[in-house]
Image (cartoon, rainbow, N blue to C red):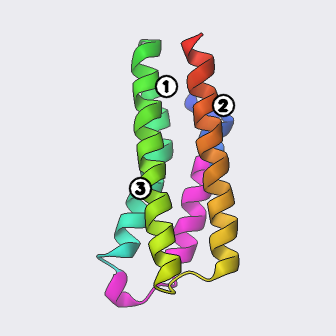
Amino acid sequence: MKSHKDLDVWKAAVELAEKIYELTGGYPGREQFGMTSQMCRSSVSIPSNIAEGAARQSSKEFIQYLHYALGSAAELETQLEISRRVKLCDAETFQKLDAALTNVRHMLRGLIRSVKV
């Protein structure tokens, strides 16, 4: 691997963060320091942790940061579900974003397995 930018999971996570920014850009102003901030931070944390881990010297450290990325994905999953329940996010958008998030989580788990070998 030359760079974290070569990782498909990093690319998918950046695209997911972009979609989260698009979604939360339409949230009411009262959510600026609430749900909007939380969702943007957790979505950015996923590719950021992948990048930071890839820059580390050992596989063990890389795996640790991939687990951090999984934690951020779990946070985002929870925030997305709450957004749906309080009607900040419609069902169709929720399904698309949930599928993208599920894909990123699947890719992260696969990368962890391959780095452990």
Q: Amino acid at mark 3?
A: Glu
Q: CA distance from mark 2 to mark 1?
A: 10 Å
Apparent side of residue 103 relative to residue 71 in the rendered image (left or right): right
Question: Can residue 25 be seen here?
Answer: no
Give the residue at mark 1. Answer: 54
Give the residue at mark 2. Answer: 6
Quadrant that contains the C terminus: top right
Furthest-left residue in view? Answer: 33
Give the residue at mark 3. Answer: 75
Above or below — where is 86 with respect to 11?
Answer: below
Apparent side of residue 85 relative to residue 11 in the rendered image (left or right): left
> CB of mark 2 within 8 Å of CB of mark 3?
no
The magenta-colored residue range is 13-31
Instruction: State which tag comes first along the sequence, 2 or 1.
Output: 2
Location of residue 54 in the rendering, given as x and y in whole percent from the top left corner: 49, 25
Label 2: which secondary element: helix
Quick one: label 3, few (<14), some, or many (20+) residues within 10 Å? some
Instruction: State which tag comes first along the sequence, 1 or 3.
Output: 1
Q: CA distance from mark 1 to mark 3?
A: 22 Å
Label 3: which secondary element: helix
Above or below — where is 66 with respect to 77?
Answer: above
Which residue appears at 55% of the width and 14% of the height?
116
Label 1: which secondary element: helix
* Count of numbered tags: 3
Q: Amino acid at mark 1?
A: Ala
> CB of mark 2 within 8 Å of CB of mark 1?
no
Q: Amino acid at mark 2?
A: Asp
